[in-house]
Each structure stands twice: as structure tokens, then as C-alpha cells.
Amino acid sequence: MSSAMIELILEATLDTLYMVAISGLISAAVGIPLGVLLNVTRPRQVLAQPALNGVLGIITNVGRSVPFIILMVAIIPFTRALVGSSIGTNAAVVPLTIAAIPFVARLVEGALNEIPPGLVEAAQSMGATPWQIITRVLLPEARGGIFTALTVTIVTLISYSAMAGAVGGGGLGDLGIRYGYNRFNPTIMLITVVILVVMVQGFQSLGDYLVRKSDHK
């Protein structure tokens, strides 16, 4: 394998990590608060707002129901307006983030739903405010579930980033399509797949470690 191809593989790997890291950070920053809102605004919760909860639920469900490849194409004008281009790694970050936010939100909501209601009731009986309940009861108790949610999201983003390469998103997916599939080079395809598998395994192992640490009593 030529040094030029090795450089292309390294560059594509870094591009994939860049896309996953940026979209993962933004989706976590937006998706975790959204997941908390989905939980605490449900009926009989600490900030019960059924109407708001219904609206947030519809928005989240719509975001989750659109297949990623369709979403990526559908928001091309928005992506171009936001980052100045519809191709490349920066452009791919936009649909990756939009796809991941509702995914994170629902997983975080599910983790919060697993918390025994008695813990919240005990905090309320001691005069805790809703903000204190969220920050000192809900989030700490759901920490393991939140780490699991973020791990699943990162793994999903890796597969989505590879899919983005099919429409000029850059990264390993683009490398595999252009130099592997289009040029009938199975070696490049195999290398691409192996790197993606190693990435998934690495992030999954890190996530499992964080879950174990957070659940340690």
C-alpha cells in the first residue's frame, strides 16, 4: 500500500472522529436537557406540564422517525446556509447532530423513568425545589443510564457518519465508497470496515467502563 493511501486512510479516520466528536458533544448538550424536560413535564412529575410535554414528545418523535439518509438530503439548504457547503465533514456534522438529539433525549428520558418514584417523593417531603430534585436526585441516580445512552448514541453516530460518506460527507464512508467500491478495491473496503469496528469497540468499552464506575456504591 502506498504512503499516499495510508495518508488518505489516516485523514479519513480523523475526519470520522471529528464528525462523531462534534455531533456527539452538541447532541449531548441539547439532548440531555431535552430528555430531562420530557421526564419532569410528564403528568404527576415535579414540573408537570402535559401540554408542553406533548409538544416536546411530538417534536422528538418526528426527529426520530426520519431515516438519516433522507434527513441528510432534506436539510441540504439548511446545512448550506449554516456552514456554507452541503458536502464535507462540517456539512455532515449538521444532520448527524439533528438526528442524534432526539435519540439522546428519548434514551435519557428512559433512564430517568427507571428511578424509583419514592426517591423523588422523599426529596419533595424534605422541601427540595424542582431544580434541586433534578440536579441532586434525578441526574445522579440516572448517571449510569445516561452514560449508556451516550455510548449507544456515539456508536450510532459512527455508523451514520459512514453513511454520510455516500453523499460526500467525508470520512471513512467516503473513502470506502470512492477508493474501495468505485475502484473495485476490496482491501480498502476491508480496512475501512476494520477501523470502524475498532472505533465501535473502543467507544463501547469506554462507555461500559464509565457505567461501571458510575454504578459503583
Image (cartoon, helix red, strand yellow):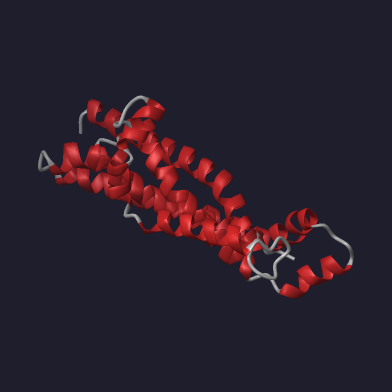
Q: Camera-side residue: 29 or 155? A: 29
Q: Quadrant of residue 43?
A: bottom right
| Residue positioned 61% across, 64% down in the render | 50
Q: Camera-side residue: 152 or 206? A: 152
When the figure is inspected, residue 71 is found, relative to residue 168, above or below; the finding is below
Q: From where the camera sits, is residue 85 visible?
A: yes
Quadrant for the N terminus, please: top left
Quadrant for the C terminus, please: bottom right
Q: From where the camera sits, is residue 212 visible?
A: no
Q: Quadrant of residue 72?
A: top left
When the figure is inspected, residue 114 is found, relative to residue 208, above or below; the finding is below
Is residue 12 toward the left or the right of residue 25 in the image?
A: left
Is residue 72 toward the left or the right of residue 138 in the image?
A: left
Q: Position of residue 95 (x, y in %)?
A: 38, 42
Is residue 87 toward the left or the right of residue 45 in the image?
A: left
Is residue 213 toward the left or the right of residue 208 in the image?
A: right
| Residue positioned 47% across, 59% down in the render | 58
Q: Quadrant of residue 90?
A: top left
Q: Position of residue 33 (x, y in %)?
A: 61, 50
